[in-house]
Structure formats: C-alpha cells, structure tokens
Image (cartoon, rainbow, N blue to C red):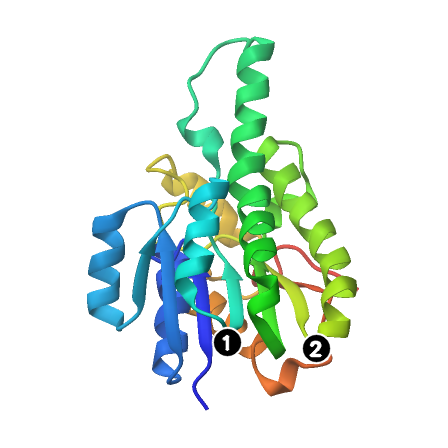
Amino acid sequence: MSRIVLVTGGGSGLGRAVAARFRAGGDTVIITGRNTGQLARTAAETGARPITCDATAPRQVTRMADELGPALDVVVNMAGGNTDFIQPGGSPPDLEHVMMAWRANLDANLLSAVLTTTAVLDKLRAGGSIINVGSIGAEYASTSYGAAKAALAAWTAGLSAEAGPRGLIANVISPGYIAGTGFFHGTLTEQRRAALIGRTHNGRAGQPGDIAETAYFLASEGARHITGQTLHVNGGAHTTR
C-alpha cells in the first residue's frame, strides 16, 4: 500500500533526495518549501506534489495542512539550515543582532518542525513516522544553529512519548558534513572540507543518499521499535556509546 509522505524543505538538497527516495519506493510524496519555482522543478523531476509553504509561518502551515487531505503516514521535517551564514555582520555584534540571529535559527530549525508536526499530528495514521533532521552541530551547540538543533533533539524525545500511544514513532537523523548541498552558502574552503572529512572514520564526505536511505529506513516496518532516538549519520565524526 502506498504511503502518503510529507517532506518539508523538499525542493532541493537533502529534502529533494529524501523525497526522491520515497517516490522511488512507490509512495505518494508532498514537498513543501518557500521557493515555488524550485518546488515545481523538483516536482516535475520526481513526481512529488508541491505545496508552497514557509514552515515558520503559522498561517501558511495551517493552509498547507488543510491542503494535504485527511491522512498522512510519514512527515520528514527537513526545512531549516544555518541562518548565521546570511545574517548581517558586525564586530562585535550588538545585542539586537544577537537576538535576531538566534531567533532566525530557532525559527528555521526548531519551530518549523514544531509547527508542521503540530499541524499534521492528527492526520498521521497508526504505524506512521515523524522524522526530524538535526545536525552534528547539536553536539557542540556553541552557536544558535547548534543550540536550535539540540533543542530539536530534546523536543523529539518528548514527542516520542506523546506520539507512541497513537501508534507513531519519532526520531532524529543527525547528519555530519554532507557534500553536494547548499548548506555552507559558498563559504566552505577546501581546507575546511578536508578537515571535516578528516574527522570521519571512513574517510569520505556524507552524501544526500546517506540521509535519504536513513529516512526511508526509519519509516519502514523494520524501525517500529526505534523511537525517541537520535541516529548519527556522520561516518564516525561524532561517536556514541
């Protein structure tokens, strides 16, 4: 039976890879994002259904949820990114800028998932999965981005307890460095790239397919007893025990 899958931030990067993987598995996929043109191109290439939506805007999220229809099986909260790269600079930054930078990352990486999940929770059928996408940056959390992703993981742990009685599971995928995305907004130097790869145990950069396959697994029958967890997909750059 084909599942109904929602992927926020599905127009490009990791979101596009996740949407394509679920489509390849025969699922009905809805992708959302702010860039209508990019969504349309990705939809044409993958067969996903596009809905333009800013996941940080409550009214737009409410409208998007209404357009989804009555049932949903999987939600992948991929919308986000490090907004520090595109905030105005200052040395030293004043407190207004600090507040703006932190709010931007909290909105993009935490509240986008909270709003979307809250809006669609009652649509998710028993056996469904909520998959939130965090970051290795959450393990250090010295920036607003890392702190927002750490908060996402903490919220997901609590969400798992709420969702469990509904027959749902909720988990976080925490990527390390993934090549082929726009995450660094053109600021990644070759030296920095080599350093990120050098921290891995397997000596390679992550690929969008690594995250897509992990998301697909977390929505599968084989993952039904995995919930409230953070799965680190980083080649060993951060290890757990």
The residue lying toward the viewer, choosing from 54 and 189, is 54
Label 1 or label 2, whichever comes before in sequence order: 2
Percent position (x, y) of residue 162? 76, 63
Q: Residue at x 56, y 55 (%)?
A: 119
Q: CA distance from mark 1 to mark 2?
A: 18 Å
Residue at 58% x, 71% y is 124
Residue depicted at 57% across the width and 63% down the height: 235
Which residue has dot 1 on it? 216
Q: What amino acid type is highlighted by mark number 2?
A: Gly
The image shows residue 104 at horizontal and vertical percentages of 51, 30
Left or right, residue 49 beside residue 86: left
Above or below, 93 against 108 in this view is above
Q: Nearer the viewer, residue 77 or 206?
A: 77
- In the image, residue 153 sits, relative to residue 4, either above or below, namely above
Q: Are marks 1 and 2 in contact (CB under 8 Å)?
A: no
Q: Which residue is mark 2?
A: 167
In the displayed structure image, the side of residue 65 where residue 174 appears, left or right: right
Above or below residue 62? Residue 229 is below
Q: In the rendered view of the protein, which quadrant contains the C terminus?
A: bottom right
Name the image quarter holding residue 129: bottom right
Q: Is residue 147 left or right of residue 208?
A: right
Q: Quadrant of residue 148?
A: top right
